Image (cartoon, grey):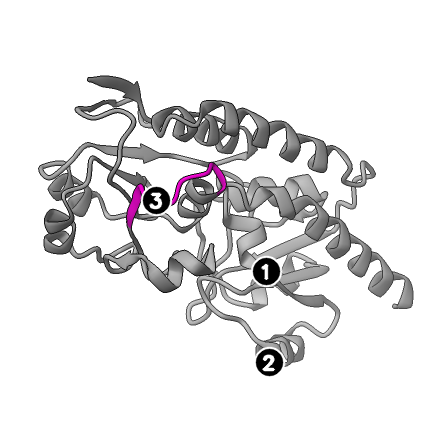
Amino acid sequence: MFHCIDQLGKTVTLKKYPPQRIISLVPSQTELLHDLGLNDEVIGITKFCVHPKIWFNNKERIGGTKNVNIEKIRVLQPDIIIANKEENVKEQIEQLEKIAPVWISDVSNYEDAFEMIEQVGALVNKAQRAKKIVPQIEMSFSKLPTSNIEHPTAYLIWRNPYMSVGGDTFIGDMLRKCGFKNIFENEKRYPEFPLCQLSTANCQLVLLSSEPYPFKEKHVAEIQLQLPHSKILLVDGEMFSWYGSRMLYAADYFKKLIETFNKINVLH
């Protein structure tokens, strides 16, 4: 028997340790499992677990993050299921707990992500590997420009209705790391808003995420018509929202994004 605590404070007990049959319901944590050195142990992933590509092409897919195939998971007989409080549906998690132990992450900021990485490392018997990933991420983030940009910014994740991110989200914390001033900092989770609100708030920078809504160049033009004085950029949503080992690449991406914004600012 192996006992551990998940990020909801719940005790999770594994009959087999280390687990040999793992199902991941969270794309960023699927990538983390690969980067921790697992392969055959991971027997099921979601259709949104696009990294690593070889797993996406070859692993058994058990549905999406919000609509997992309960029966398919039952047939796979996992030793452990790795889920997330926000990305997965509570009612489905409760059904899955009747099949196998479910370890649930809850990541709202930079520090939570480190805790998750180390706890997942311990859960799958890769603690030492996990403890090497965390300082590498810390080192890369320490090299981000220290000057505070403080330009009023909106990060859009959805269209019709438009939705952004509050200050209590992981994406909100990544915006702070970049030095961008989130105009929805005092809002909770994912507020809906009319575009005219961005103009009223003197929003200087609008970031259009590639996920969950796949914003494209046509949306830049569409929004620019309504916000002629704002800078609008398409951004890689994985860099802002994947709270696993993808963070190894996020700081370099943020540095280039900040440089791009600064160049645009100078030109204007």
- Asked whether 173 falls inside the magenta stretch, the response is no
State the separation of the CA atoms marked 3 and 2. 30 Å
Q: Are marks 3 and 2 in contact (CB under 8 Å)?
A: no
Q: Nearer the viewer, residue 10 or 262?
A: 10
Count neighbours of disc 3 (C-alpha within 10 A) and say few if under 14, some if 14 to 19, many if 20 or more.
some
State the separation of the CA atoms marked 1 and 3. 20 Å
Count neighbours of disc 2 (C-alpha within 10 A) and say few if under 14, some if 14 to 19, many if 20 or more.
few
State the separation of the CA atoms marked 1 and 2. 19 Å
Where in the figure is residue 79, as x and y percent of width and height? 20, 35
> The disc labelled 2 sits on which kind of residue?
Glu
Please state, as top left, top right, bottom left or bottom right, where the N terminus lies in the image. Answer: top left
- Callout in the foreground (3, 2): 3
Where in the figure is residue 48, as x and y percent of width and height? 37, 60
Residue 86: give its label: 3
Disc 2, SS: helix
Q: Residue at x 32, y 40 (%)?
A: 85
Disc 3, SS: loop
- Name the magenta segment's main secondary structure: loop
Locate residue 153: give its quadrant.
bottom right
> The disc labelled 3 sits on which kind of residue?
Glu
Q: Which residue is mark 2?
A: 222
> The disc labelled 1 sits on which kind of residue?
Asp
Q: Are marks 1 and 3 in contact (CB under 8 Å)?
A: no
- Could you tell whether 7 is left or right of 236 in the image? left
Count neighbours of disc 1 (C-alpha within 10 A) and say few if under 14, some if 14 to 19, many if 20 or more.
some
Q: Residue at x 31, y 27 (%)?
A: 8
Residue 236: give its label: 1
Give the mark nearest the N terminus, 3 or 2.
3
